[in-house]
Image (cartoon, helix red, strand yellow):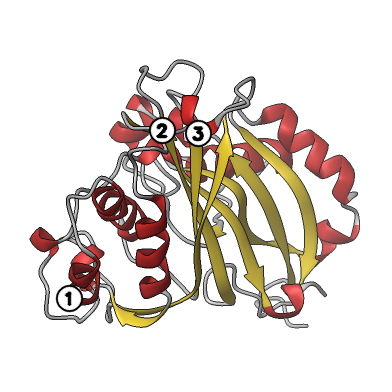
């Protein structure tokens, strides 16, 4: 190797979990914004810099972007290290060390060596998001930071209509009516492989009519900015009888505007549940 040749590097992938309520989202922000409320990316990069004693920024690439307040049960990011450094790195000790540096609300669950061409964002084959609704007349207490309160019960909320609407969402459609007006996607067509609702009685309540959690789950090839939150807000309107099923088909036609869909539901009830890769990308 010539003296001017760049040192060979190897790629590592982090599996992360984070509480979105504590951060301004995944994406690194300006220095001013990072001081006010840090990003998950910024905190992970700082922890990597401390552990590796790096004088320059250790750049990581995430598997997507999450809005402020949105949490992740599973989130992946990759970064590169000089091959000489990686050969001496104990991955479990490295994981434990990072967790000791990272702030409350972020955890590294796993560290893997991956292929040199693995890309945390481009190689994603599908993702699953979960949005949680709390149905009960009384205001939320224990679930106030993890569920969106709908002051109804299962006796008044049209759960079967909501499930019918979910089935119509499955398939390949134009979701432009569900995307944020400032989205930057080149196309708004996405395929949803599965959209379903799971109903659970609140812990300590045998009768779901006294209070229930509805977990809306969406598995797809990819999602637009605020798409899942707007789907959730629109589906709540279906459950409340404020919107008929035919309007869902109209919204998926690609001819409807954002103003025709329901509200963008709050971020605190949304979490990225799982991320899938073909062959998982490990080396």
The Cα atoms of the two marked residues, 3 and 2, are separated by 5 Å
Residue at position x 18%, y 80% in the image: 254
The Cα atoms of the two marked residues, 3 and 1, are separated by 30 Å
Task: Give left or right: position of 64 versus 164.
Answer: right
Foreground residue among 235 and 35: 235
Q: Earlier in the sequence, mark 3 or mark 2?
A: 2
Whether the residues at callouts 3 and 2 have beta carbons within 8 Å, the answer is yes
Foreground residue among 165 and 210: 210
Foreground residue among 267 and 167: 167
* Residue behind mark 3: 212
Residue 194 location in percent, x, y? 52, 71
* Quadrant of the rendering where the C terminus is positioned: bottom right
Residue at position x 69%, y 52% in the image: 15
Tell me the element at label 2: strand
Tell me the element at label 3: strand
On screen, residue 208 above or below 244: above
């Amino acid at each position: 190797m010539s003296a001017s040749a760049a040192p060979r590097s190897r790629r590592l992938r982090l599996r992360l979990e984070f509480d979105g309520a504590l951060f301004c989202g995944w994406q690194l922000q300006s220095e001013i914004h990072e001081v006010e409320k840090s990003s998950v990316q910024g905190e992970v990069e700082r922890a990597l810099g401390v552990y590796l004693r790096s004088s320059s920024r250790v750049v990581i690439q995430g598997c997507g972007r999450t809005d402020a307040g949105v949490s992740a049960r599973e989130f992946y990011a990759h970064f590169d290290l000089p091959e000489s450094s990686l050969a001496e790195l104990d991955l479990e000790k490295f994981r434990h060390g990072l967790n000791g540096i990272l702030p409350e609300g972020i955890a590294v669950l796993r560290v893997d060596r991956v292929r040199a061409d693995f890309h945390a964002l481009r190689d994603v084959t599908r993702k699953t998001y979960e949005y949680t609704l709390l149905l009960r007349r009384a205001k939320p207490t224990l679930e106030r930071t993890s569920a969106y309160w709908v002051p109804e019960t299962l006796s008044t909320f049209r759960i079967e209509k909501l499930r019918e609407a979910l089935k119509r969402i499955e398939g390949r459609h134009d979701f432009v009516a569900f995307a944020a007006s400032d989205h930057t996607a080149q196309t708004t067509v996405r395929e949803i492989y599965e959209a379903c609702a799971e109903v659970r009685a609140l812990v300590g309540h045998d009768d779901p009519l006294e209070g229930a959690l509805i977990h809306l789950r969406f598995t797809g090839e990819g999602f637009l900015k605020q798409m899942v939150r707007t789907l959730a807000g629109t589906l709540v309107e279906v459950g409340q009888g404020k919107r008929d099923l035919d309007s869902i088909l109209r919204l998926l036609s690609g001819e409807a505007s954002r103003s025709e869909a329901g509200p963008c539901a709050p971020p605190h009830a949304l979490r990225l549940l799982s991320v899938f890769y073909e062959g998982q990308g490990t080396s």
